[in-house]
Amino acid sequence: MSQSFLLMQKWMQIGHLFQHVRWSKLFRGMSRPDFFVMTMLLHHRENHPESQGIYASTIAEHTQVSRAAISRQLQQLENRGWITRHTDPNSKRNVLIDLTDEGVAAIRLQHERGEQFFYRLFERVGEQRMKEAIQALDLLVSAIQEEIENLPGSSQGDNAKGVCE
């Protein structure tokens, strides 16, 4: 069996395991889409403290979900008290989305649960092997991004890097 086939097989096994993890068991009380949107909002808040939020269209673009679906999801998050919407002071026609204090606490709790899960994996595998695995995965991510960018029909606008960061 070739090394590339073995790599592909292991990659698929890991993906299969994570697809079948009962999300509700690992991240209780928050759906996957909510987790990803709220993580994006937290990341934006932490990296742009001067900002008052981001636009729903930006969330839709980065999650590759339709604006209508994002709008429904944001309504649910707002109903739970996790986000707030307010008019952009620079453009009265636009609405900014931001986390509430309760939303920040909710997503940080989910991140903590995820960290605990991976910490247990880290403990089982060992520090040195985990570091080696991370280095190998970093190399693979870079190689995959380069291969995607070099596929026929790819344009400069098709940036695989932005999806993974």
Image: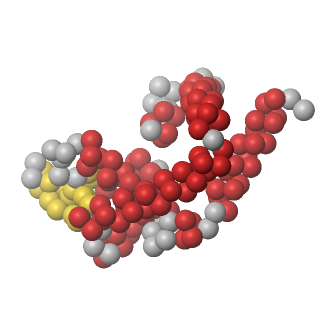
Please tell me how many numbered marks the rendered image carries. 0
Residue 92 appears left or right of 85: left
> In the figure, 7 relative to 114: above or below?
above
Residue drawn at (36%, 73%), measured in percent from left and top? 76
Residue drawn at (27%, 73%), measured in percent from left and top? 81
Residue 160 in the image: state x and y as whole percent: 52, 34
Q: In the orientation shown, which residue stands out farthest toward the left?
A: 89
What colour-coding does the image apply? Answer: secondary structure
Residue 21 appears left or right of 97: right
Taking depth in this image into account, of 101 and 158 the one nearest to the observer is 101
Taking depth in this image into account, of 35 and 136 the one nearest to the observer is 136
- The quarter of the rendered structure image containing the N terminus is top right
> In the figure, 128 relative to 125: above or below?
above
For the question of whether residue 21 can be seen, the reply is yes
- The quarter of the rendered structure image containing the C terminus is top left
Residue 23 in the image: state x and y as whole percent: 56, 66
Taking depth in this image into account, of 79 and 105 the one nearest to the observer is 105
Residue 71 in the image: state x and y as whole percent: 35, 65
Q: In the orientation shown, which residue stands out farthest toward the bottom?
A: 79
For the question of whether residue 35 can be seen, the reply is no
Q: Looking at the rendering, which quadrant does residue 100 occupy?
A: bottom left
Residue 38 in the image: state x and y as whole percent: 36, 58
> In the figure, 121 relative to 107: above or below?
above
Residue drawn at (21%, 56%), measured in percent from left and top? 96
Q: In the orientation shown, which residue stands out farthest toward the right?
A: 1
Residue 165 appears left or right of 153: left
Residue drawn at (30%, 76%), measured in percent from left and top? 79
